[in-house]
Amino acid sequence: MNLIIFLLFSFDYSIKSRIDFVYDYNIFEYSEKYLQEFIQQVNPERFPFETYDDLYTYYRLHLQFRNKFWRNHNTTFNLSFSGYNYFINEQKDYSIFTAGLRQSFGRWAVKIEHLYLPRYLIRYYKDPENSRYIGCEFSERLCSFKLSFIPDKEADLSLVIGYEIDDYIKEFDVYDSRALRVGPVFEFGITKFFKPEIHYEFKSSRAKGPIPDISYNQHKLFIKTELYTGFPKFSKWEFAYQMRYRIYTTEVSPVLDSPHSGRLDTVNNFKISWEFPILAGLYFTLGYSCEFRHSHSEVYPDIGEYKNYNKWTADCGLEFVYF
């Protein structure tokens, strides 16, 4: 209790909380072939789920505490928690914890942050030790460092470097991976009504292997624009596009690892959302997104039949903001 009182009265603080209700058409990112097998109950042990689509609740709490410990420059602590709870396929539930520290030095700033994902279920895969299907799950830790330059109040130029550790359950420990992530971030306001962002990231992930070897290099581009229309007053449109181009780098013989040898993946994601105030600090949101993956391999020409997927989501929610 004393710590809470100290934080409330010694720091400036802000709170953001959000809850969304989301419909996801393809929660396991199945290809059309696998969707049809699910519907027709072919290989039912591969699909121990009630549905391939679902409704889920997304909720997030983000806290920031600010004080000026050094030469009148802000020191900011942030804590956040996000949760995803599915209405039918509860084994798909997961949560994310994040903690960070940012120190401003005038026009320059540095930030360190740690993200922890305790458990995430991808889908069911065949156990390498026998023929039964089990859930392929992993946990993730991501430590990142961000160096920012703020030339004026409408611009922020940053470089982000991250180190990621993915730890799979023991049956799939050949997938255990370590990854280096690096890239610039550009945020700027062309006008007070139009604020774009551009992110690029190069990711080099190396898996334990040796068979299969899911190591890859990846290029990721993210573009987002915020457009304030003023209708209704203080409302905001957001348009976002993300592209991931993944090059699998395994040197294992195609005979032993055909699903990854010579494989290239391209994932495109488009999202649009609309936010408008209903009370002071309380906003209503509507959103829609669609995502497509295309896989290609000279070694395994039919790879797309198993790895290509389409999915879309629609959501509505409430967000509360206090500064």
Image: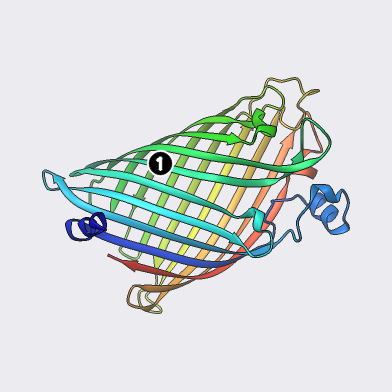
Kindly indicate the quadrant of the structure image that contains residue 167.
top right
Image: 5 above or below 253: below
Q: Is residue 289 above or below residue 250?
A: below
Would residue 204 be seen by someone viewing this image from the given angle? yes
Residue positioned 72% across, 24% down in the render: 211
Local secondary structure at mark 1: strand
Three-letter amino acid code at the position of disc 1: His
Q: Is residue 16 left or right of residue 242?
A: left
Q: Position of residue 90 (x, y in %)?
A: 65, 58
Residue indicated by mark 1: 114
Q: Residue at x 58, y 53 (%)?
A: 269
Asked which quadrant contains residue 254, the reply is top right
Name the quarter where the N terminus is drawn. Answer: bottom left
Left or right: where does residue 281 sit relative to residue 127?
left
- Front-most of residues 176 and 263: 176
Say which of 222 and 68 sits in front: 68
Residue 153 visible in the displayed image: no
In this rendering, the answer to whether 259 lies above or below 125 is: above
Judge the density around disc 1: few (<14), some (14-19), many (≥20) Cα neighbours within 10 Å: some
What residue is drawn where x is 40% and y is 51%? 197
In the image, residue 17 lies at what x, y percent? Answer: 40, 64
Q: Residue at x 25, y 54 (%)?
A: 3
Look at the image and tell me in which quarter the C terminus lies. Answer: bottom left
Measured as percent of width and height from the top left, residue 262 is found at 71, 28
